[in-house]
């Protein structure tokens, strides 16, 4: 839904104290509702010609840059219209569907990649403005809008200088650089200072201290050193010690973020922001009770029904649908669904227990940050030998056979990885994503139970009384008693479709499932039991446990390497020990045409046995050595050493020399056996960083 930002979800004013805002209105629009209570008038409007939504701000002066400032990370200004008396202007802006960063931070701290994504997008928008000679001057969380894809746009760039400094609250003033507090003009360096403060607020959930020391020094203890260096420079006391512009700030930020979180951090950050925006937008709707489309976005109705000339309005946001039944109105049961989905969006995790008609059973839990863990298999209790455990961490999937000791152990699975993920695993999304999908379905003419309908009230799920909604996404079941929670979801599937077609063949006037009417793509799921997970500590305890086990994970068949030399030719023993050298090469296999998703692997040479002159030395290992994956093949050389071979070699050499002295000739060999090249997707350091990230996510849940 369109989102405007500011104090208490309002758009901040751009006027000077005491000004009177113009009373005229933009022609050709219908005002839906005011946005905010500041000194300037800000309204949500709908175009009379197209029905499109927009936000209009009535000001005494036009913002710098006006409609010329166009960038994906800046809220678009479509028109700047002068008032009829020439005493003011109306700024017509795009209405962004999502939530303000201020609203997101009012609920919880953000995971590190999400905070980095906010800072990156903000710097991109600010850089575009700076390059047009426009400085923001008062950047703060209320000036950042996050849409439902996790994309951020900066609002209020180029506001008049008087408006940017007038009547600032103590909270807003905390983001201002020291020189602005001294009355000096704003600059790109002061915008960067404010952006860095907002980034720290994303990580900590509160404004960093800014008086008496650099706020960078108050960064959280777990902020990695590469990012700490960037923040400390951006928040230096003197403007000349900071980054001179947003573009240079951004370059160092991206390099540090990639060093800490890997090259795919932007995608993960956007996904996390999208989840947070979906949850916040559903819980804090912009369209209020007095405007068309009132209520949370998933409750909006396509139309209102008139009965006896009176409009039936929402009571406690429940839409009343009047049906003719002996002249008595009937009330749809909607509130349990909306409350259950709102609660789902806020939970730390959700458990899916699914039965696929072709591939078997799935028991998968997904956290709010998109980690997954669970089991897949052919047996309902996952007791079959081919059944597997799965875990998804940092966007990568790993599998381990549950019941086959010979094959047990985590293996990276590119066939189901995020960029190549099997269609069924895509069903198991975060709580906020699932809530957004099902809430949207409730906004598309669902068939809801009716109060007093005995058949509807008799529905149960695993013995628990449940309400059932027929939606374009399938059947949704929630509890009949508060506190309401989701129980089951039956996505559109072939069985439902065939049953609907069979009923229609018998009775052409019969109602079809909404999913069939909407031509929703069919799934193979026979129904999913949904359990919101509220125990965040227990949930993340399991995630951390599985992540730590990935220290020994391998890449399996996705990376295959072949020895180019073997046996005695790659072993050399001397008085210092036995050295084994192995050169290798091999293909990197892709599960599909999509790009391979690992950027690095770690290869370890393991030698089971070394002999010198017939004497057993033991084995050796090279330890994990990093190799970049830049194409479809991989080659290199690994070495391991066993110093214990030195004394044994000396003994063998002495005996050999004695034989040579006695017989005139003698020789002996060094030999290595059971050579194994093991490829790992993660190093112990990588695993430690993932665990630290997950622990931070747990802390962010409060």
Image (tube, rainbow, N blue to C red):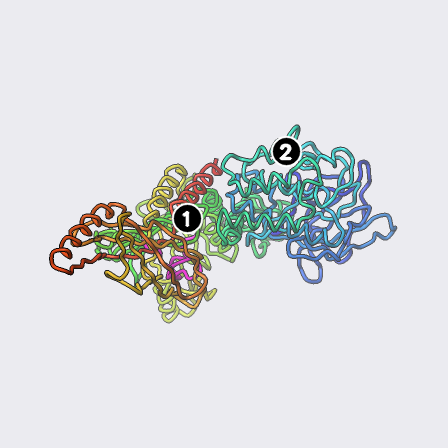
Left or right: 675 as drawn, with respect to 109: left
Q: Residue at x 66, y 55 (%)?
A: 53
Q: Residues within 10 Å of mark 1 (few under 14, many from 20)?
A: many
Instruction: Verify whether residue 665 appears in magenta.
Output: no
Q: Position of residue 35 (x, y in %)?
A: 68, 44
CA gap between label 2 and label 1 equals 35 Å
> Disc number at residue 371?
1
Q: Position of residue 5 (x, y in %)?
A: 65, 44
- Seen from the viewer's position, the closer of residues 318 and 672 is 672
* Magenta-highlighted residues: 411-429
N-terminal-most mark, 2 or 1: 2
Q: Residue at x 62, y 31 (%)?
A: 209
Q: Residues within 10 Å of mark 2 (few under 14, many from 20)?
A: many
> Disc number at residue 685?
none
Q: Position of residue 447 (x, y in %)?
A: 46, 56
Q: Residue at x 49, y 44 (%)?
A: 342
Instruction: Verify whether residue 419 appears in magenta.
Output: yes
- Residue 328 in sight here: no
- Residue 32 in sight here: yes
- Seen from the viewer's position, the closer of residues 134 and 39 is 134
Residue at which label 2 appears: 214
Q: Residue at x 71, y 47 (%)?
A: 156
- Seen from the viewer's position, the closer of residues 584 and 548 is 584
Residue furthest right in the image: 85
- Mark 1 residue element: loop
Q: Position of residue 571 (x, y in %)?
A: 27, 57
Say which of marks 2 and 1 sits in front. 2
């Amino acid at each position: 839904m369109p989102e405007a930002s500011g104090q208490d979800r309002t758009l901040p004013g751009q006027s000077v104290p005491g000004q009177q805002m113009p009373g005229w209105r933009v022609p050709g629009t219908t005002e839906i509702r005011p946005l905010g209570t500041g000194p300037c008038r800000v309204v949500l409007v709908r175009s009379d010609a197209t029905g499109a939504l927009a936000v209009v701000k009535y000001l005494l002066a036009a913002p710098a840059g006006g409609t010329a400032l166009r960038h994906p990370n800046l809220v678009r200004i479509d028109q700047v219209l002068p008032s009829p008396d020439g005493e003011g202007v109306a700024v017509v802006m795009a209405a962004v569907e999502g939530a303000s960063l201020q609203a997101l931070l009012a609920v919880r701290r953000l995971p590190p990649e999400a905070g980095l994504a906010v800072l990156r997008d903000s710097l991109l928008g600010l850089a575009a403005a700076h390059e047009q000679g426009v400085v923001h001057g008062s950047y703060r969380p209320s000036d950042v809008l996050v849409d439902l894809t996790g994309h951020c746009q900066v609002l209020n760039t180029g506001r008049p200088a008087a408006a940017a400094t007038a009547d600032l609250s103590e909270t807003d003033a905390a983001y201002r650089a020291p020189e602005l507090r001294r009355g000096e003009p704003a600059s790109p360096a002061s915008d960067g200072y404010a952006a860095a403060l907002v980034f720290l607020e994303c990580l900590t959930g509160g404004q960093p201290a800014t008086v008496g020391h650099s706020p960078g020094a108050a960064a959280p203890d777990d902020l990695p050193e590469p990012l700490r260096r960037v923040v400390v420079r951006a928040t230096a006391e003197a403007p000349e010690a900071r980054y001179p512009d947003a573009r240079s700030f951004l370059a160092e930020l991206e390099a540090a973020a990639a060093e800490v979180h890997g090259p795919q951090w932007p995608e993960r950050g956007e996904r996390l922001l999208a989840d947070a925006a979906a949850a916040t937008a559903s819980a804090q709707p912009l369209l209020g009770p007095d405007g068309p489309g009132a209520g949370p976005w998933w409750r909006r109705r396509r139309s209102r029904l008139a009965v006896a000339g009176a409009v039936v309005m929402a009571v406690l946001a429940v839409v009343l649908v009047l049906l003719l039944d002996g002249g008595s109105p009937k009330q749809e049961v909607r509130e349990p669904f909306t409350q259950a989905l709102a609660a789902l969006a806020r939970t730390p995790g959700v458990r899916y227990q699914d039965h696929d008609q072709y591939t078997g059973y799935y028991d998968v839990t997904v956290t709010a940050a998109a980690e997954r863990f669970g089991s897949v298999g052919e047996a309902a209790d996952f007791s079959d030998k081919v059944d597997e455990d799965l875990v998804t961490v940092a966007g990568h999937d790993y599998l381990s056979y549950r019941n086959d000791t010979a094959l047990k152990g985590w293996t990276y699975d590119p066939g189901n990885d995020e960029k190549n993920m099997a269609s069924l695993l895509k069903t198991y999304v975060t709580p906020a994503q699932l809530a957004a999908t099902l809430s949207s379905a409730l906004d598309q003419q669902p068939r809801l139970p009716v109060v007093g309908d005995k058949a509807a009230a008799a529905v149960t799920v695993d013995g628990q009384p449940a309400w059932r909604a027929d939606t374009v996404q399938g059947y949704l079941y929630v509890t009949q008693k508060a506190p309401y929670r989701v129980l089951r979801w039956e996505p559109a599937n072939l069985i439902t479709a065939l049953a609907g077609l069979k009923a229609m063949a018998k009775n052409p006037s019969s109602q079809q499932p909404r999913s069939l009417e909407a031509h929703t793509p069919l799934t193979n799921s026979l129904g999913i039991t949904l359990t919101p997970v509220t125990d965040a500590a227990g949930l993340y305890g399991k995630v951390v446990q599985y992540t730590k086990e990935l220290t020994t994970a391998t890449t399996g068949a996705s990376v295959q390497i072949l020895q180019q030399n073997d046996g005695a030719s790659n072993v050399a023993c001397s008085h210092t020990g036995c050295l084994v050298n192995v050169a290798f090469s091999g293909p990197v296999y892709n599960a599909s045409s999509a790009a391979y998703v690992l950027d690095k692997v770690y290869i370890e040479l393991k030698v089971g046995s070394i002999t010198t002159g017939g004497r057993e030395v033991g084995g050796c290992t090279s330890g994990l050595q990093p190799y970049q994956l830049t194409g479809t093949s991989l080659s290199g050389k690994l070495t391991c050493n066993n110093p214990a071979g030195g004394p044994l070699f000396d003994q063998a050499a002495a005996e050999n020399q004695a034989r040579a002295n006695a017989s005139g000739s003698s020789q002996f060999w060094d030999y290595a056996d059971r050579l194994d090249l093991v490829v790992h997707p993660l190093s112990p350091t990588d695993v430690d960083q993932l665990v630290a990230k997950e622990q931070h996510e747990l802390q962010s849940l409060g």
